[in-house]
Image (cartoon, rainbow, N blue to C red):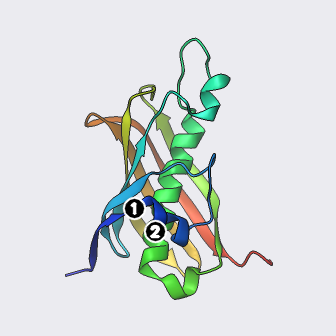
Amino acid sequence: MPDVIDVINIDQIKKLIPHRAPFLLIDRVENVVLDSEATGIKLISGNEPYFAGHFPDFPVMPGVLIVEALAQTASVMVAATIPDLTDGKLVFFTTVEKAKFRQPVRPGDAVKLHVVKNTNKGPLWKFTGKALVDGKVVAEADFGAMIVDPDR
């Protein structure tokens, strides 16, 4: 049976990935099955900085940031799986495919960001992700990422 981590809290997330406010887009990661899948949680506050311009009279979380939150969840899973190989490294998108946005994400929503690893070869990883609010899919995408040395 694979190793499982029940919860990775915000302090642990900051040790695993380099993102910080206002661009750290996950609050915790749950049900981490190392080298396989994880679920990030983002609690959407009305004070998110992007709401000032997207859209002030009807605040909606930008779809691209939902995909970024999926990728951050995947990055935490990868970093928890292989900490020796990811310590001090960065994870960059290589592809985003089949992105679909089905419903707006609004202040007060709790977004569950479920990611599943499809494949990995060396520093290249591929995932499928779905973002859900109240059990309904609000966005989904397939995406790839690459672990790189920041000096590169």
Q: Residue at x 57, y 34 (%)?
A: 48
Q: Give left or right: position of 49 versus 98.
A: right
Quadrant occupied by the C terminus: bottom right
Taking the view exactly as shown, the residue that stands out farthest to the left is 1
Which residue type carries mark 1?
Asn
Taking the view exactly as shown, the residue that stands out farthest to the top is 57
Q: Residue at x 39, y 28 (%)?
A: 108
Residue bearing the label numbered 2 = 12
Q: Badge 2: few (under 14), some or many (20 or more) residues near its Cα, within 10 Å?
A: some
Mark 2 element type: helix
Which residue type carries mark 2?
Gln
Task: Find out whether the residues at labels 1 and 2 contact each other: C-beta distance under 8 Å.
Answer: yes
Residue bearing the label numbered 1 = 9
- Image x and y of residue 139, in percent: 43, 38
Taking depth in this image into account, of 123 and 110 the one nearest to the observer is 110
Q: Is residue 111 above or below residue 21?
A: above
Q: Give left or right: position of 80 versus 86.
A: left
Q: Is residue 5 above or below residue 108?
A: below
Q: Give left or right: position of 46 versus 102.
A: right
- Image x and y of residue 121, in percent: 53, 80
- Image x and y of residue 109, in percent: 38, 31
Q: CA distance from mark 1 to mark 2?
A: 5 Å
**Which labelled disc corresponds to residue 100?**
none
Snapshot quadrant of residue 17: bottom right
- Image x and y of residue 30, in percent: 31, 60
Q: Is residue 54 above or below residue 19?
A: above
